[in-house]
Amino acid sequence: MTDVELERQALALFEQMLDVPEGERDAWVAQHTQGRPELASRINAIREADRKSMLQTGAATDALYEEDAPERIGAYRIVSRIGRGGMGSVYRGERETGDFLHVTAIKIIKPGLLSESLVERFERERQTLASLKHPNIAQLYDGGATQSGSPYIVMEYVDGLPVLQWIDERDASAAERRRLFGDICAAVTVAHQNLIVHRDLTPSNVLVTHDGTVKLIDFGIARLADSGVQAPGAEPASRSSLQNLSLTPGYAAPERMTGSEVTTAADIYSLGRLLEKMIVPDAGDAELRAIIARATAEDPARRYATVDALRADVAAWGDHMPVAAMEGGRAYTVRKFVRRHRLVVFSTAAAAALIVGALGATWQAYSVAETARAGEAKRFNELRDLAHYMLFDLNDRLERVVGNTEARVSLAERAQSYLSALATSADIRDDLRLEAAEGFIKLARIQGVPGEPNFGEGAKAKVNLGEAEKLLRAITDPKLATAPVLARLYAHQSVIEVHTDNDTKAAERSIAKAVKALDSTPAAGRDLGWMQARSTVRKAQLELADLSDDMPRVQALAESLAKEVGDWPAEEQTSRAAELDRAYADYYRAYVLSFDDATMAQSLPLFRDAEQRFRELEKALPHDPLVLYMLAWTGYNAFAPASRLAKDDDAAHFIGLAQSTIDRLMAIETQDNGLITMSTGIREAQAQWLRDQGRFAEAIATQRDVISGHKKLLAVKRSANTLGAHGFSHMILGIIGRDAGNRTLACDSWRQAERDFADLQKRGTLSGFFAEFLPGMRANLEKCAAGRPISDFGALR
């Protein structure tokens, strides 16, 4: 028996032994190595190394197997060994390309260390890892196997130091350390969006170059080591000795030590430990300690939902903003605001010190002034200024910070009191009516206008839009431009009607009112405010056309939206609002192309363009909920064509983008039911993707979980939205059942979907999109009733 064969058998038996109780292991090893002392000796050597934690750093395996350095690997000449670890050695490779020398790092996995199935998986994953491109990730160029059969990978050569060494040698400032950690998080986020988990985020795997550039190395190596892929219904795999090769004490998540399923939460744990070493918290720094505690929670469910959420909290801590991990509520948020704006707070009267309570205090002062009639104008204007600041400026800041929903709800409630009092004032002037109407519209958007993050309070939003309309209709001053404001109001109203109420006819009437309001403005009066109102109306029209499944209309509106930005004043052409409209136009252009088999492939580059535009906007104003909302929709809707075209890398990227972005949004907008629905939709898309991959058992389980969520929502509120979603999910389960050859599941699921859609049809609230599936579904149900074989079932549309 060769040393390699002996090594493989020893590792295989060691792996099985880990499931044996500690006190019975000696007898177990003796029984399974009877008559083979060399095998028993090798296993016991591995056990001893494991006991001393040497195996986790690679030292034990190095002692057990000493490989010779090859002279060449593929086209690369081996110059020297850079390092050696548990899974193998890393060499410096050089290749002459034209007039320059291409230097790489080449990692060779130890011969015999990986089973045949893991070698096959290594080969399959190489291209996915090679597509992982980010300035803070060491690029994987190539891979293969040596003549002796050892797998190898060719990576970018990084001339740098481990992050902690770099920090120590340069005595890096706190700001520099935060910047490094942010770059690390950005790299890990990109990996997670591509459904890749690093699994071994440690200081030695984070290098920093001489100019301060972060480079993460060894992506995919640890993933390979503990890939727990198994067939549905199979017994769970035992904790592998190969897992231990990618475990680093102090940085590995608890679930890795127990052999539990490893998710992105494992990387978040490691990042928390890394943060603790990079920025050691002071004894009194409760916020940083809270961030580390949440990231490294024993229970993965209690950690940050995404790496971006962790990154946002660290950034908030550095900027003296509220930290979500503190869970401090309204009082904590107020204290943070006061601390950041200490000079402003203490120079603008005591009322401002409490922020949320300020409005009530100023209103009380105004009431007294009404009685005394002394200083009325000044106090009233102070009230207006403060309320405007709270509803517009402060809310717009808070909506980008995780954990501020409670404070924003309080702000909205205070603003509601102010606006109601102002609107019913006996001597209200027209300019104040316009101001109050704008406030009611803003409040409605915060409360419950779909298409952008909101509190999920659609009924309140409709009431406040109604209040705004009354005020606008009462204005008689011809100098005040009310038409654009009315147009925006009706546009928001239509979105509520089509999404929340599922009433397309009412939405069409509101859109018609919005267009009429725009048309009533003479050409000479169509200023920037009018143009931006037209943009709002276009987006509402796009929502309605989309839900009516009118793709030619969507295409025409997208082109109009892009063209009309050109009408804006020159100084506004590069504004955030203009760039946002261009991003919307790219998104909808791609969306239309994705529905047609002939143009589906053309949609993916456009979706990428839209993604890039939204990313640039989010980079300029981090955590903007509206931009994140559209980024999530871009990922979600780009996933479908990528999946249908079998572009697996693109599909993984887009569904990862959708899920990670929606997780960030749900951390910011905890009361937005639309986000919950969208998260469910993403899981539904994943179920269909699993079906396309032929992984039917997983697809069925995922889709049943989706349906379970819809049933809970239906039990709380039986509306057109919840009933439609419930029926659609059953319809999808039927399609999965059909493709899986499960006739009973297909027929039962379609019967339920047909009942739900028929109910909506009777009410007159069945959307055009759902209606298109009914004829095909009913035709298949007739075949179910006639006992026809599943092979006779056709497409639903």
Image: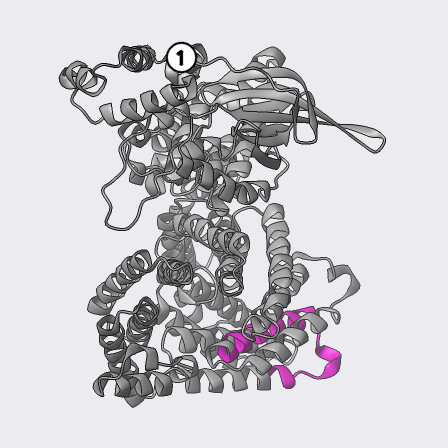
Q: Which span is picked out in magenta?
A: 517-545
Q: Is residue 294 left or right of residue 235?
A: right
Q: Residue at x 47, y 66 (%)?
A: 451
SS of the residue under disc 1: helix
Q: Residue at x 64, y 50 (%)?
A: 616
Q: Is residue 411 above or below residue 117?
A: below
Quadrant of the frame with the C terminus? bottom left
Coloration of the structure image: one colour
Residue type marked 1: Ala
Q: Is residue 670 above or below residue 52?
A: below
In the image, 187 versus 500, the foreground residue is 187
How many residues crowd mark 1 within 10 Å: few (<14), some (14–19), many (20+)?
many
Q: Is residue 5 above or below residue 527?
A: above
In the image, 406 versus 269, the foreground residue is 269
What is the quadrant of residue 310 in the picture?
Answer: top left
In the image, 250 versus 316, the foreground residue is 250
The single residue placed furthest to the right in the displayed view is: 99
Residue 392 in the image: state x and y as whole percent.
51, 56
What is the quadrant of residue 140 in the picture?
Answer: top right
Q: Is residue 518 magenta?
A: yes
Task: Mark yes or no: residue 176 visible.
Answer: no
Q: Is residue 377 above or below residue 757?
A: above
Q: Is residue 371 left or right of residue 514?
A: left
Residue 411 in the image: state x and y as whole percent.
40, 53
Residue 689 in the image: state x and y as whole percent.
42, 60
Does the magenta stretch mainly form a helix, a strand or a loop? helix
Instruction: Report which residue position mark 1 lands on.
Output: 60
